[in-house]
Image (cartoon, rainbow, N blue to C red):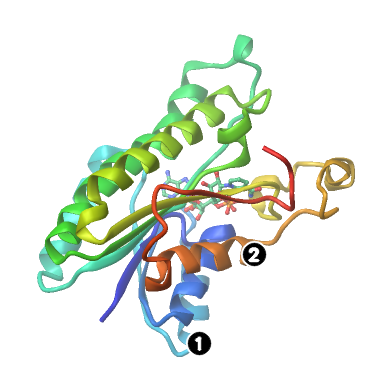
Amino acid sequence: MKIALITGGSRGIGRAIVLKLTEMNYHVLINYCTGEAAAKETLSLIEQMGGTGELMPFDVSSQESIENALEIWYKNNAESHIEVLINNAGIRQDALLMWMKNEEWNDVMNTNMNSVFYITRRLIKDMLIKKYGRIVNVVSLSGIKGLPGQVNYSAAKSGVIGMTKALAQEVGKKNVTVNAVAPGYIKTDMTKDLDENMLKAMIPVGRFGTATEVAEVVGFLASDKASYVTGEIISVNGGIYT
Ligand code: NDP
């Protein structure tokens, strides 16, 4: 059984990636934090497609929560190998730096960046032993060009871009690839407070993107067809020049 773990797989871009990997015949581990109803809905969409999956709740902003959940899973599935990891879970808490609270900085760094370190460190051991792995990190336009009001989020995503490039060089010889996808403005809960009519003027394609459009690129990077692509950051942003 081919197994993939998608953090924040319950809704938005994560759900679209879960469905893409189901289409690619993966048994999907759907991580989420508090939104159990959305996660169950995602699982039922998998089953409607004839696929299989399981819920894997843990809080990616907590090292302890991550390590406990992964150890329990590996203990119960000793013979299994998670060969695809999609680090997708993320939050934004925007504020101008001058007014930014410690919690806004820490929550965004823990959820978007430190999580990638703790989860990847555990899963990569097995990928190196098995000599196969695909890691795709969902970063952001904000981590490439920086966006005002998002010093915390831009720093976290930029950090993950650095991790992607460095780790790709550490593990390339073991047939493990590490890439990132950098979405621009995508229609999900995360962007529902933004004014699409105003923002679309600066997007060459003239609209926000869909979660499925991001998932298609993630699916390619997670496939064995992308075997010679590693350490890359691919923008999916409707042509915004970065
Ligand atoms: P959504 O807000 O729609 O979904 C976020 C997902 O992350 C949910 O499944 C949520 O689960 C999960 N999540 C959040 N916090 C935690 C946590 N502490 N532990 C576990 N899971 C958590 O976001 P999007 O789908 O829009 O974003 C997905 C990724 O894409 C993020 O990394 C985001 O930064 C990035 N991105 C999004 C863009 C956009 O325009 N939408 C643009 C650029 C990048 P739960 O409900 O249980 O908390």
Which residue is painted at 48% across and 81% down in the image?
23
State the image coordinates of residue 54 (x, y, percent, origin top left).
Answer: 34, 72
Amino acid tagged 2: Glu
Q: Is residue 158 above or below residue 118?
A: above
The numbered dot on residue 213 is: 2
Q: Is mark 1 within 8 Å of ligand 1?
A: no
Quadrant in the rendering for residue 50: bottom left
State the image coordinates of residue 209 (x, y, percent, origin top left).
Answer: 72, 57
Compared across the picture, whether 233 is left or right of 122 comes to right
Which residue is painted at 69% across and 50% down in the image?
237
Quadrant in the rendering for residue 151: top right
Compared across the picture, whether 89 is left or right of 97 comes to left
Q: Quadrant of the C terminus?
A: top right
Looking at the image, the residue that sits furthest to the bottom is: 50
State the image coordinates of residue 114 (x, y, percent, origin top left).
Answer: 35, 35
Which residue is painted at 16% across and 57% down in the image?
128
Total marks drawn? 2
The residue carrying mark 1 is 49
**Numbered disc in front, either 1 or 2:** 2
> What crowding class fits label 1: few (fewer than 14 Cα within 10 Å), some (14-19), or many (20 or more)?
few
